[in-house]
Image: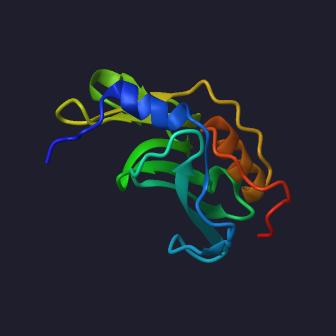
Amino acid sequence: MSWPYSKADVNWFVSTPKRPKTKETNWGKSKQGKDCLQLDLSLETIEIYRPDSLRYCVRGKTDIPESYSSAFLLQNRRIRGIDFTSVPIRFMYGQRTKEIGWHENIINYNIDPPGNDHHYSLEVTCSDLDAFHRFCCLHWNIQLREEKMLL
């Protein structure tokens, strides 16, 4: 099945205001290992109803900020992600393909094979998982409840 969304459609989903479908936002254990937490939220657009499946996931070890990772999914396919790269990955002839540091993945399924651009312009200064979660929600225009979530 081909990807039914244009680049403009995907950008609209990223930039339009969204909120969790339910008020329940509980952190659960992650399969990533000991002391890892994960939050998985189904989202809905606020201004214009769209029946498309939107999800937001964030996970990481609570005491290691470099382990934090988030993903924004459309129809269960990752279209955006925020991660940390600790070791540069090199390509042929010593050309660096990935820098060290925080980056946003921008995935494009309209090309074959799907493109995954890494944008290193993010300034993530989060000291805990909840702050990282709030940073990602602000970055992707996901509106949360006002009270701080308990980890």
x and y percentages locating residue 40 in the rendered image: 55, 64
Pick the residue in front: 12 or 105.
12
x and y percentages locating residue 85 in the rendered image: 53, 42
x and y percentages locating residue 142 in the rendered image: 64, 45
Q: Is residue 48 left or right of residue 147?
A: left
Pick the residue in front: 81 or 137.
137
Q: Is residue 53 above or below residue 48?
A: below
Pick the residue in front: 123 or 50.
50
Say how many tags the image has.
Answer: 0
Q: Is residue 26 something one can see in this rendering?
A: yes
The residue shown at (38%, 25%) is 8
Which residue reaches farthest right? 147
Here the colouring is rainbow
Which residue reaches farthest left? 1
x and y percentages locating residue 126 in the rendered image: 77, 45
Res 60 quadrant in image:
bottom right
Q: Is residue 23 left or right of residue 3?
A: right
Q: Is residue 115 above or below residue 59?
A: above
The C terminus appears in which quarter of the rendering?
bottom right
Res 137 quadrant in image:
top right
Q: Is residue 100 something one can see in this rendering?
A: no
Q: Is residue 28 above or below residue 75?
A: below
Q: Is residue 38 left or right of residue 107?
A: right
The residue shown at (69%, 47%) is 143
The residue shown at (64%, 50%) is 66
